[in-house]
Image (tube, grey):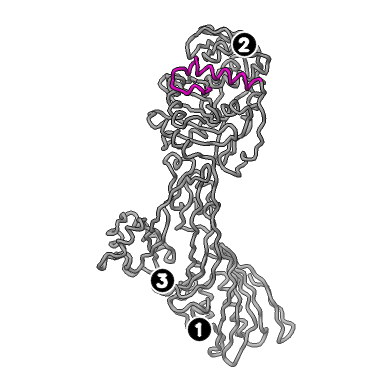
Amino acid sequence: MLGRVSCAGPRARTRRLAKLASGASLALVLVVAIAACGGSSSTPSDTLHAFLAAWGRHDYAAMRAQVLTPPPDFKAVNATALSALGATSATFMPGRIRQSGSHAAVRVRQRFALAPGDWDTATTVHLINHKGHWLVAWTPATINPALHAGDRFAVVRDWPARAPILGAGGAPLTTERKLVTVGVVGGRIKQPPAVAADLLASGASKAEVDQALAEAKAHPTYFEPVFQVTKARFEQLKDKPGPGNVYAVPGTQFELAADRSALTPQLGAHVVGSVGPITAEELHHLGAPYDASSVVGQTGLEQAYERRLAGTPTTRVLVLDPAGATIATLKSFPGHPGKAVQTSVDPAVQRAAEAALADERRNAALVAIRPSSGQILAVVSDPTSYGYDQALEGEYPPGSTFKVLTSTALFGAGLSPDSAATCAPTLTVDGEVFHNAEGEAPVQTLGQAFTESCNTAFISLATQHLKPADFTAVARTYGLDATPQPGLPAFDAEIPKPDGETSLAATAIGQAGVVFSPLGMASVAAAVASGSVRAPRLVAGAPDDHVAAKPLPSNAVSDLREMMAGVVASGTAAGTGLPSTTHAKTGTAQYYAGGKLRTDAWLMGYDGDLAFAVVVVDSDQINGGPLDGPLVAKFLNALGPQ
């Protein structure tokens, strides 16, 4: 409410600041200069005070009461003017009232807080003494001098071209084509049935037309998109002869847009992501300068880095005539271009990985990493329709691929690949019977047990030489104790501390509560390949991009490399087509789901400076070597030596 005005004499003035909040989000701040006090019950200052106060609280009926001969659309014109600006606050600062006989005028400075910044402008309020009462001589120019009868404000945002998402070496991971968004502006529509008919004839669906016209009626100053056409199709529509030309019918409007998609459907599904029309929820979250016509990132990096990629639009405050033509630009706020998002994805590696899994009918996921840098080169998650990225966020029991970590813990306990081991058909621990997934080959050492993936040998060694805390320690050794932050949501592994002898035995072979993502297992393979643990890196500048590498114990590195080479040469991955230079570890994880025993098939490893991990979910009881080996062989052979 306005503060009390005190008068020290006939020419005393006071300036008061009052914040007047409306039921809407617009809060108006009014600074009123009272030119005179006392005397007549109706003075220019009294009327100005009442008029601006009512304006400030959106009380158009009270405003109208202070106006001489207000037009029938007085309320609509004032309300539409303020809503069209989308201001969050406005400040009115009147100057000195200048009176000449029965006429008076005052210059009122206005400051509107718009999304891109403050708009400072001014108007003049004219007053007239009508039969002893001072009233406002209102016209649309009272709102702003540039407004005349039938004119309206419009705030137009011109977004810069969306910045690209780049892969290794600056290769683009997105492609674009020019489109035209066909839409309507309710305030310009003269004949809704004609507009609807022309839109339908141009290719829009009835649902699209009905929704857009309903929104246009509710928000007559907004541009409401109906559908999109290619630039070539738009030119055809524009040149169509006759009254059905959608370009010519009053009420339609057109905006040039770009259809943006990822380099491959795989990248579009999860990593690069997609863009599309903004939803109400997204508009609420993003806020200004976005509006109902904005196109924003919907998934993946497009969504995660929306503001960075989009930049900020050039915003112009316009005055439009009744036909929608621009007659004045009152204010322009410069925009800023978006900034590219640089990733480590290598298009050649990505395509090879996608091709390798293309014929696999089961759910499958693969991650490839450059061991020397920790950079993620490829991410594949099939099918693309799956609700999340299985490669980066999946949680699967790793089976015998976990023996890489168990071996690391055993080496820390003083064992070596030559340490004695036996591979019994079964082994009972606290009443729990454990079996071998890969059969029972002759085994005399830890190294041979690794090559043949003998469960009972690893359980026997682990229960003799390891404590529960050793598994927590080995997780920390491989950097699996921290949540990965490569630039997208990600999960690497969870390795619970065993709570008993049976749990320790199951943990040693990648069961119990142990779960990994392909990202986490590929990171383990990369650590063995390079000799150092590196956080997986995807987006330049993301938190993991700055995590320092830490070395693995040198004896563990050399021993693991030797044993992983043996897996390919003569062990569970032999004869699967893998290049002879590949080092790997197979895994077969069994678990019950839906009352059925299911199997996930794993293969992790590296070839030169390329590490990988792949999982095929519910593999129909096929083990990791025979199922995943040919998939990875196809992948590696397509790329050649790394």
Q: Residues within 10 Å of mark 1 (few under 14, many from 20)?
A: some
* Nearer mark to the viewer, of 1 and 2: 2
Q: Residues within 10 Å of mark 3 (few under 14, many from 20)?
A: some
Residue 420 magenta: no
Residue behind mark 3: 324
**Disc with the residue nearer the chain's start (1 vs 3):** 1
Is 250 or 168 nearer to us in this picture? 168
Q: Quadrant of residue 4?
A: bottom right
Specify the segment rendered in magenta: 555-583
Is 345 or 425 nearer to us in this picture? 345
Residue at the spot 65% in from the left edge and 27% down from the top edge: 476
> Residue farthest to the front?
641
The numbered mark at residue 68 is: 1
* Amino acid type at image mark 1: Leu
What kind of element bears circle 2? loop
Q: Quadrant of residue 56?
A: bottom right
* Nearer mark to the viewer, of 1 and 3: 3
Residue behind mark 2: 418
Q: Residues within 10 Å of mark 2 (few under 14, many from 20)?
A: few
Tell me the distance, in whole angstroms, between the alpha carbons under discs 1 and 2.
103 Å
